[in-house]
Image (cartoon, rainbow, N blue to C red):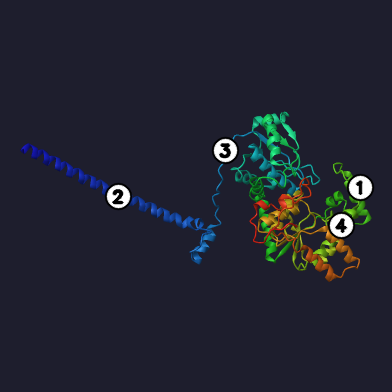
Amino acid sequence: MKVRLLGETKVEKLRNSFVSRSRMSLWMIRAVTILLLWSCFVHLMALGEMWGPRLFKGWPSCFSQHDLSTVEEMGSLPAKISLPPKRVYQNNGYLMVSCNGGLNQMRAAICDMVTVARFMNVTLIVPELDKTSFWNDPSEFKDIFDVDHFITSLRDEVRILKELPPRLKKRVELGMHHEMPPISWSNMSYYQNQILPLVKKHKVLHLNKTDSRLANNGLPVEVQKLRCRVNFNGLKFTPQIEELGRRVVNILREKGPFLVLHLRYEMDMLAFSGCSHGCNPEEEEELTRMRYAYPWWKEKVINSEVKRKEGLCPLTPEETALTLTALGIDRNVQLYIAAGEIYGGERRMKALTDAFPNVVRKETLLYSSDLDFCRNHSSQMAALDYLVAVESDIFVPTNDGNMARVVEGHRRFLGFKKTIQLNRKFLVKLIDEYTEGLLTWDVFSSMVKAFHSTRMGSPKRRLVIPNKPKEEDYFYANPQECLQLLDEPLRVI
């Protein structure tokens, strides 16, 4: 009995000792944990003072004015770029593309080719730009667009490489690949059923013409939205071009509102279109010689006046001056000319500068040295004009070309910014009647205003013409699938 009691006493002592030690260990763990948490808290507070303003930038503000100034100061620090995850897919081959035409013709083509590559599950090689067209611009993709941004911003959709892997590059050099122009205005089934098998067979396919190779309409919404994503997010100009564009816009903004006039009245446009209204006989002869000098331009004999009356010629500077005045544009507005050298020079520009004395160009707003890097590079100069046109208070193109249409679509995407879409066929008829004395100024002006009141870049449906894609509305001028439409009801014009 005594032995048992003694044993029980020892067990009790051991138990009490174990509980005591457990409690001591528990308190020590708690103390260390508290110290660690306090240390973390102190470090987080220190980091919060440095990074907090940036983390909360854009949130409903509870900061004081001092705090807001700190936010602005910290906003100048480089932010960490969040890249989309890479899309993982079984690669069916490699697609090389050679774009043709001017800057905006190539821009739209690049968007189409990225979309085609994505839906065929192929790897796209950074597109080659046109160097053999009339403009003879030697610029590479990287000279105009931010190539690294292009690749990384779209990597969750398609794999894009700057060049072919060495083994395949050698095969291309030996001619072991397939090259062809795709059929114009094709839908995705054409690329899936006819182009994809060629990629799988040859491993590398080279599409040597890319303009207007994807249809305007009848495509799945996800296809259309990807075209928009490439255009409005993936394709950024180089930092140097972007910075120069911002500088031009800031110079203009400091002096008030500005209108960008895409005055497509350069020598090449007039020669190839055959539009010579207002030119003297020597100029008409010069334009004709130029047209015949380029064998790839098939239309040689052109009746200028017939073409003008059909609305197929760009407005002249004189016609443009009358039209802008009739529309009620303030004569003191800054009129930025987005174009190359105007044919006929100051003589042809006189009517426009008399009506609007604040006519400016990039060459008059910047120092000559600012443009050195892009001088004699028409696509880079066009990129600068593009940036200014997109940001303008009003955009007015005098011809329905690629720049006019792509800028119009970009301005729609930015909130249906005012873009006056001139109807040239209507205008030249009215202008002729006015200059012949058949209309008073008041009647002429009121008719111009009334006709164009619904042509200001407001929401509308694309015009669809089955089997006539060239005559229907261009996707990039009105990418309606990608737009946040306003409350105003859509209408067909």
Q: In which quarter of the image is residue 205?
A: top right
At numbered mark 1, what does the secondary structure look like: helix, strand or loop?
A: loop
Residue 344 circle label: 4
Residue at the extreme front of the image, as rendered:
466
Of circles 4 and 2, which is in front? 2
Comparing marks 4 and 1, which lies closer to the viewer? 1
Q: Residue at x 71, y 50 (%)?
A: 476
Mark 2 is surrounded, within 10 Å at the Cα level, by few (under 14), some (14 to 19) or many (20 or more) other residues, namely few
Residue furthest left as drawn: 2
- CA gap between label 1 and label 3 equals 54 Å
Q: Mark 2 points at which residue?
A: 30
Between discs 4 and 2, the one toward the N terminus: 2
Q: Residue, x 63% and y 50% (percent of image)?
A: 233
Check residue 301 in the rendering and tell me which mark sits there, or answer none: 1
Looking at the rendered structure, the kind of residue marked 4 is Gly
Q: Distance between the residues labelled 4 and 2?
A: 87 Å
Element under label 2? helix
Residue that label 3 marks: 88
